[in-house]
Amino acid sequence: MHNMKELVQRFPQNPLLQPGDVRPSRPDMVVECLLNPGVFRYQGKIGLLLRVAERPRPEEGWVCTPILDPDSEGGIRILRIRQDDPGLKFTDPRIFEYNGRGYLTTLSHLRLAWSTDGVHFTVEDKPTLLGTGDHESFGMEDCRVEFINGRYWLTYTAVSDFGVGVGLITTTDWKSYTRHSIIFPPHNKDCAFFPEKVADKYWAFHRPSGLGIGGNFIWVSSSPDLLHWGGHQCLATTRPGEWDSERIGAGAAPILTDRGWLAIYHGADANSRYCLGALLLDAQDPTRVLARSRAPIMEPLADYEQTGFFGNVVFTNGHIVEGDEVTIYYGASDSVICGAKASLATILASLPAS
Ligand code: MAN
């Protein structure tokens, strides 16, 4: 099952969390997938901010998807469409089109899970953050968490009928939350803040999508205050014919090493097979790429990474660094949460000389 040449070591306990470990947000909903956690330390514990994707119990002959709607009972409206409706078009298990408009098959919220050993996690009983307002009616996804200036900064994908953008929330205690505005409007996702200032500015990765011209590329931007972003520059593009030919996006915050900023990113090919790779950026100038993985540092090879809600996916947006060791928490097959360890020196040594 495992390719021993890979430079990451998967946890033997994988998967660490599965949909059955999480209580649905309402009795009429089913937890379908656990995905892509943000990761942080708080009061001696490791916290995961999970993406929990739910949908109504399946009904024979119908496609049902939940949409947040403050005017509906319980704050959720169920869109019910007959499976044979000619207006219905299925693209993949995650998304569908109805009468020319795009919808998600599941609704995601964010939920905390805690651990003292980084392997065994206890998931909170209730959603921590639910989509709020017009820009999150299709949910909140794939949250990056970074601790800067005494606060945790949560950058997540806000999905609605208006598009897919990046939302920002801050907290100090994981009990009360301050919601800021959308910081990168549609179409944009995969936003991760750098942990500290570089050249007197804050920095963030994000992933706008070009329509027709351009593509799904990683951009880097700077800010005086972590709220207002400018100086946008394209940092890395997809590579035709390679494992990252279709779309790329940042993982969590980059890691400062003695060779520069090491960033772990995801790349997908035309078959939507998601792997992880690494980028090395200049320590003083994060717009300068010094090196990039030729081959992935991690591929979907384990059974649980190949089969699931959306198979052949390893996707990360959170890790913990301890000396030379990075523990990568990741979503496998858009279904379960897993962990893997790697040596930073080994990842750096795998990058082509620049
Ligand atoms: C893609 C996938 C889905 C996600 C939507 C909206 O289709 O990443 O998992 O729900 O985008 O962000």
Image (tube, rainbow, N blue to C red):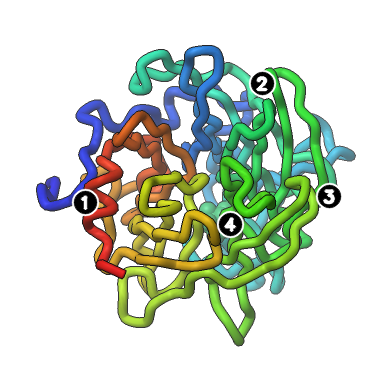
Query: How far is disc 4 from disc 2 in space, using C-alphas?
Result: 24 Å
Secondary structure under badge 4?
strand
Q: Which residue is drawn at 31% across and 81% down?
A: 241
Query: How far from the left and from the top, in percent, is residue 13?
Result: 25, 26
Query: How far is disc 4 from disc 1 in space, using C-alphas?
Result: 27 Å
Determine which residue is flagged by label 2: 174
Determine which residue is flagged by label 1: 301
Lower sequence index among marks 4 and 1: 4
Determine which residue is flagged by label 4: 205
Q: Depth-wise, is mark 4 or mark 3 nearer the camera? A: 4
Question: Residue flagged by tag 4: what amino acid is it?
Answer: Phe
Q: Do the residues labelled 4 and 3 touch (CB within 8 Å)?
A: no
Secondary structure under badge 1?
loop
Query: How far from the left and from the top, in percent, is residue 316?
Result: 43, 46
Lower sequence index among marks 1 and 3: 3
Q: Depth-wise, is mark 2 or mark 3 nearer the camera? A: 2
Query: How far is disc 2 from disc 3 in space, using C-alphas?
Result: 24 Å
Determine which residue is flagged by label 3: 134
Question: Residue flagged by tag 2: what amino acid is it?
Answer: Trp
Q: Do the residues labelled 1 and 3 touch (CB within 8 Å)?
A: no
Lower sequence index among marks 4 and 3: 3
